[in-house]
Amino acid sequence: MSSPEISSLSWGQMKVQGSAITYKDCKVWPGGSRAWDWRETGTEHSPGVQPADVKEVAEKGVQALVIGRGMSEALKVPPSTVEYLKKQGIDVRVLQTEQAVKEYNALVAQGIRVGGVFHSTC
Protein backbone atom coordinates (compact mmCIF):
# COMPACT_ATOMS: atom_id res chain seq x y z
CA MET A 1 0.00 0.00 0.00
CA SER A 2 1.44 3.37 -0.97
CA SER A 3 1.29 6.69 0.84
CA PRO A 4 -1.38 9.09 -0.44
CA GLU A 5 -0.22 12.26 -2.14
CA ILE A 6 -1.14 15.61 -0.60
CA SER A 7 -3.08 17.16 -3.46
CA SER A 8 -3.44 20.72 -2.17
CA LEU A 9 -2.36 23.02 0.63
CA SER A 10 -3.44 26.53 1.56
CA TRP A 11 -3.77 28.38 4.86
CA GLY A 12 -5.94 26.19 7.10
CA GLN A 13 -6.79 23.66 4.37
CA MET A 14 -5.19 20.45 3.19
CA LYS A 15 -6.53 17.86 0.76
CA VAL A 16 -5.18 14.32 0.65
CA GLN A 17 -5.59 11.93 -2.27
CA GLY A 18 -8.33 9.39 -1.58
CA SER A 19 -10.11 11.50 1.07
CA ALA A 20 -13.15 13.71 0.54
CA ILE A 21 -12.35 15.60 3.76
CA THR A 22 -10.58 18.97 3.83
CA TYR A 23 -8.24 18.91 6.80
CA LYS A 24 -6.87 21.79 8.87
CA ASP A 25 -4.12 19.68 10.40
CA CYS A 26 -3.66 16.09 9.35
CA LYS A 27 -1.81 12.83 9.74
CA VAL A 28 -1.03 10.70 6.68
CA TRP A 29 0.45 7.22 6.28
CA PRO A 30 0.57 4.45 3.68
CA GLY A 31 -3.06 3.74 2.85
CA GLY A 32 -4.73 6.47 4.88
CA SER A 33 -5.13 9.86 6.49
CA ARG A 34 -7.13 11.55 9.22
CA ALA A 35 -7.54 14.86 10.98
CA TRP A 36 -4.84 15.65 13.54
CA ASP A 37 -6.69 16.84 16.64
CA TRP A 38 -4.16 18.36 19.02
CA ARG A 39 -6.58 17.93 21.94
CA GLU A 40 -6.01 14.14 21.83
CA THR A 41 -2.52 14.60 23.26
CA GLY A 42 -2.69 18.11 24.74
CA THR A 43 -0.36 19.44 22.05
CA GLU A 44 0.28 23.18 21.87
CA HIS A 45 2.63 25.27 19.70
CA SER A 46 5.19 25.02 22.48
CA PRO A 47 6.58 22.56 23.51
CA GLY A 48 5.11 21.29 20.24
CA VAL A 49 4.82 17.90 18.55
CA GLN A 50 5.09 15.16 21.15
CA PRO A 51 6.03 11.50 20.60
CA ALA A 52 2.34 10.69 21.23
CA ASP A 53 1.43 12.82 18.18
CA VAL A 54 3.61 10.78 15.82
CA LYS A 55 3.23 7.34 17.43
CA GLU A 56 0.15 6.38 15.38
CA VAL A 57 1.92 7.18 12.09
CA ALA A 58 5.20 5.57 13.18
CA GLU A 59 3.33 2.34 13.94
CA LYS A 60 2.11 2.14 10.31
CA GLY A 61 5.52 0.86 9.20
CA VAL A 62 6.82 4.08 7.65
CA GLN A 63 10.43 4.46 6.53
CA ALA A 64 10.30 8.26 6.75
CA LEU A 65 8.11 10.74 8.60
CA VAL A 66 7.75 14.40 7.62
CA ILE A 67 6.63 16.97 10.19
CA GLY A 68 5.14 20.25 8.93
CA ARG A 69 5.66 22.98 11.53
CA GLY A 70 3.14 25.44 10.05
CA MET A 71 3.31 28.20 7.48
CA SER A 72 5.29 30.45 9.85
CA GLU A 73 6.92 27.54 11.71
CA ALA A 74 5.13 28.38 14.97
CA LEU A 75 4.82 24.70 15.91
CA LYS A 76 7.88 23.46 17.79
CA VAL A 77 9.36 19.97 17.51
CA PRO A 78 11.36 19.02 20.62
CA PRO A 79 14.44 16.78 20.38
CA SER A 80 12.57 14.03 22.29
CA THR A 81 10.15 13.59 19.38
CA VAL A 82 12.93 13.36 16.78
CA GLU A 83 14.85 10.91 19.01
CA TYR A 84 11.71 8.77 19.50
CA LEU A 85 11.39 8.35 15.72
CA LYS A 86 15.11 7.84 15.04
CA LYS A 87 15.25 5.07 17.67
CA GLN A 88 12.69 3.22 15.54
CA GLY A 89 14.84 3.60 12.44
CA ILE A 90 12.56 6.21 10.91
CA ASP A 91 14.09 9.01 8.81
CA VAL A 92 12.69 12.27 10.26
CA ARG A 93 12.30 15.52 8.32
CA VAL A 94 11.11 18.67 10.11
CA LEU A 95 10.21 21.54 7.78
CA GLN A 96 8.00 24.58 7.22
CA THR A 97 4.68 23.12 6.03
CA GLU A 98 4.84 24.16 2.36
CA GLN A 99 8.35 22.68 2.13
CA ALA A 100 7.24 19.65 4.17
CA VAL A 101 4.42 18.89 1.71
CA LYS A 102 6.84 19.14 -1.25
CA GLU A 103 9.28 16.81 0.53
CA TYR A 104 6.51 14.39 1.50
CA ASN A 105 5.13 14.24 -2.07
CA ALA A 106 8.67 13.76 -3.47
CA LEU A 107 9.16 10.79 -1.14
CA VAL A 108 5.75 9.38 -2.19
CA ALA A 109 6.81 9.69 -5.86
CA GLN A 110 9.97 7.71 -5.05
CA GLY A 111 7.82 4.88 -3.66
CA ILE A 112 9.01 5.35 -0.08
CA ARG A 113 6.64 4.34 2.74
CA VAL A 114 6.29 7.84 4.16
CA GLY A 115 4.03 9.30 6.80
CA GLY A 116 3.48 12.82 7.96
CA VAL A 117 1.92 15.16 10.47
CA PHE A 118 1.12 18.60 9.13
CA HIS A 119 -0.01 21.89 10.69
CA SER A 120 -1.55 24.11 7.98
CA THR A 121 -1.83 27.47 9.72
CA CYS A 122 0.71 29.46 11.75
Image: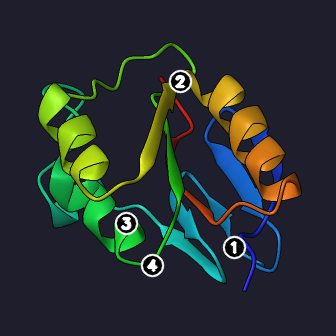
Instruction: Return the mark for residue 60.
Output: 4
Identify the amino acid type marked 2. Answer: Leu
Residue placed under numbered mark 2 in the picture:
95
Residue 107 image point, x, y percent = 75, 48
10 Å neighbourhood of mark 1: few (<14), some, or many (≥20)?
Answer: some
What residue do we see at 72% from left, 35% from top?
103
Residue located 17% across and 60% down the image: 52
Question: Element at badge 3?
Answer: helix
Tell me, for residue 103, which label it has, or none: none
Task: Give the alpha-carbon distance from disc 2 to disc 4, as whole Å.
Answer: 21 Å
Q: Tell us which disc is closer to us: 2 or 3.
A: 3
Q: Which amino acid type is marked by label 3?
A: Ala
| Residue at screen point 14% across, 60% down | 41
Q: Residues within 10 Å of mark 4 (few under 14, many from 20)?
A: some
Residue 58 marker: 3
Give the alpha-carbon distance from disc 3 to disc 4, as whole Å.
Answer: 5 Å
Q: At label 4, which amino acid type do we have?
A: Lys
Q: Residues within 10 Å of mark 2 (few under 14, many from 20)?
A: many
Tell me how far mark 2 sits from mark 1, CA to CA: 24 Å
